[in-house]
Image (tube, rainbow, N blue to C red):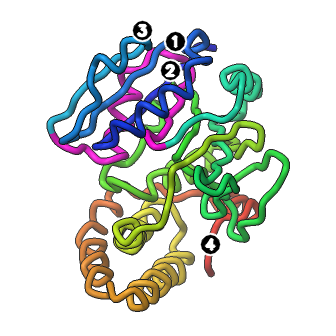
Amino acid sequence: MTISLLILTHDRPKELLKCLNSLRAEQENLLEIIILDNGSQVRLQASALSEFPKIKVFHSEKNLGVAAGRNWLAQRAKGELIWFLDDDAWVKTNQTCEFIRDYFKKPQLALVSFNVLNAYSGEEEKRCIPHVHKNTTQVDMLAAYFVGCSFVMRRQLFLDFGGFWENFEYSCEELDLSYRLLNQDYDIIRSHTLQVFHAYSSTSARNRSWIYFNARNRPWAALRSLPLKYLPSYILGWWIYAGAIGFKQSEFKLFCRAVTASLKGSFSALKTRSVISASSCEKVGSLGGRLWY
């Protein structure tokens, strides 16, 4: 199976170059590397890419957001498998493409996500474990959702499912797609073998982003996919959670703006509503997804 590597980047030229350097050993195993510069003010110089003959670089004058940017990349990829990799992450695993192909010998597998390690501590990022309890494991795990730092999906399946809902912009687009995949009896696996380092450290900007997008987007994900009985507890639960963190960090006004934006965008979410089955909801719960009821 051919693999297209897709990277969305924004104002991180040094991180992007480190990401690409980690892939030197994989170049021959990739059909192509497509990079979308997503409205960056600071760009990586073309001369820095001379050692990567399979790279195609495109530029967008405005920031399309993560969801739309990834859709753009997928539509231009030619590989049977599309591998999305964050620009501030770099690959740890040797023979990554070989492992990826082995996973996709299973016809019901839609998507495999990588085990995300913190680049500064070397430890597994617990926030990236796709399970409510965040327990580290030494094995692959079937998952109710995936984290978008590094993941691989069948390209045609991604396109058939319509990719990511672009209104999300950033955050929850992976959860939304996961609901739809599980509802069609596809599997999502979080790999233990496939590992990627992520240059993540908590900052005030990231904390503000978490508060805003979780308060705004979680209700949209619920409105698009979950049965009615789950909506009140799910939406209120996330608002209480995000609001408490916002209050604790003196960002309650930001939280209120996010709730307002969420309410305004609810009509668009409801217009695209496609409810997953009761059995799919049970599967989400059994795999460690959050469903409050």
Relative horizontal placement of residue 8, taking residue 26 as reference (left or right)? left
Q: Earlier in the sequence, mark 1 or mark 4?
A: 1
Could you tell me which quadrant the N terminus lies in? top right
Give the residues drawn in magenta, as a range.
62-88
**Which residue is labeled 3 in the image?**
53
Q: Earlier in the sequence, mark 4 or mark 2?
A: 2
- In the rendered image, residue 67 lying in the magenta stretch gets the answer yes
Give whichever of 227, 78 is nearer the camera: 78
Q: Amino acid at mark 2?
A: Ser
**Which residue is labeled 1 in the image?**
31
**Disc 4 to disc 2, C-alpha distance:** 34 Å
Select label 4 or label 2 by which is in front.
Answer: 2
Measuring 45% from the left and 30% from the top, which residue is drawn there? 159
Measuring 60% from the left and 44% from the top, which residue is drawn there? 197
Q: Amino acid at mark 1?
A: Leu
**Which residue is labeled 4 in the image?**
291
Q: Quadrant of residue 24?
A: top right
